[in-house]
Image (tube, rainbow, N blue to C red):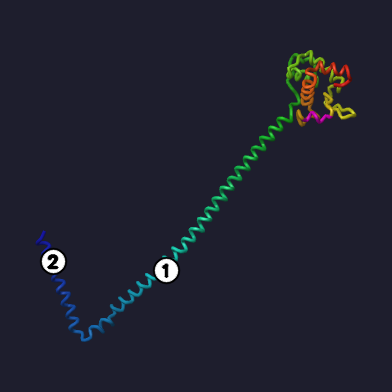
Amino acid sequence: MIPLLTRYGSRLAAVLVLALGAVIAVYAINDTPAEEDANHPSQAAAEQQAEAEAMYEEVRFQHVNYIRETAGADVTTKADAVADYAVDKAQGLNDAEQAAEEAKEAEEAAEEEAAANSNPTSVDIPSSCDEFSGNKATGCALTLDHGFDLEQFACLELLWDRESGWNEKAANGIGAYGIPQALPGSKMATEGDDWETNPVTQINWGLGYIEGRYGEPCSAWAASEEQGWY
């Protein structure tokens, strides 16, 4: 290993000696070495290269500063814009969700109100009420649904025969209306908004009224027999 390094070292030394001899020869030949060096094309090229590098460094420095200064502002602006967009987007989503929720609640409320304010126009008639037809058959079925027996319905039949003839559109001069002759007829709206035309709504309201005031249809019939109204 050492002989190999020695050989390479000898060759390197020889090259350096030859190069140094050439430099000395050039200086020996030229009478004005300083002036020649200054005017040599390579020297001019080196100076131009140095000036170009200096200008590049200055431009690069200014560019970096510009990027640093403007980039901060741009990032802030973009960050603000992104933040504003996020807020608007979130608000928009919240508004949409709230609107959807309100629409759903309104729809459910409307369905509940519709269910509360409308009744079927007919009911299943049990066999025990087969002898009746029309509104009386409906009245018989609903009387049983309210927990009364057929004896109580017999009283109710007599009562409403007198009041309206079981006509759902019956009206008198003082404002009583419908099968039970509610006074005023609009009272039956508590049972359903179809109170003017639906016998089921009217009968349910009338049975509720009788239960609340008299307890049962036969007591209501007795009051009507005694005083002419119930």
Task: Check the picture and name the quadrant holding the N terminus.
Answer: bottom left
The quadrant in which residue 217 appears is: top right
Q: How many residues crowd mark 1 within 10 Å: few (<14), some (14–19), many (20+)?
A: few
On residue 9, the disc is 2
- Residue 134 visible at all: no
On residue 62, the disc is 1
Of residue 123 and residue 217, the one placed in the foreground of this image is 217
- 226 lies above or below 119: above
Task: Check the picture and name the quadrant holding the C terminus.
Answer: top right
Q: Which mark sits nearer the N-terminus, 1 or 2?
A: 2
* Region in magenta: 184-189
Residue 153: x, y in percent? 79, 16
Q: Amino acid at mark 2?
A: Gly
Residue 207: x, y in percent? 78, 21
- Residue 119 visible at all: yes
Q: Is residue 67 left or right of residue 87?
A: left
Secondary structure under badge 2? helix
Q: Is residue 62 left or right of residue 9?
A: right
Query: Rounded to the nearest whole Å, what is the CA distance between mark 1 and mark 2?
Result: 48 Å
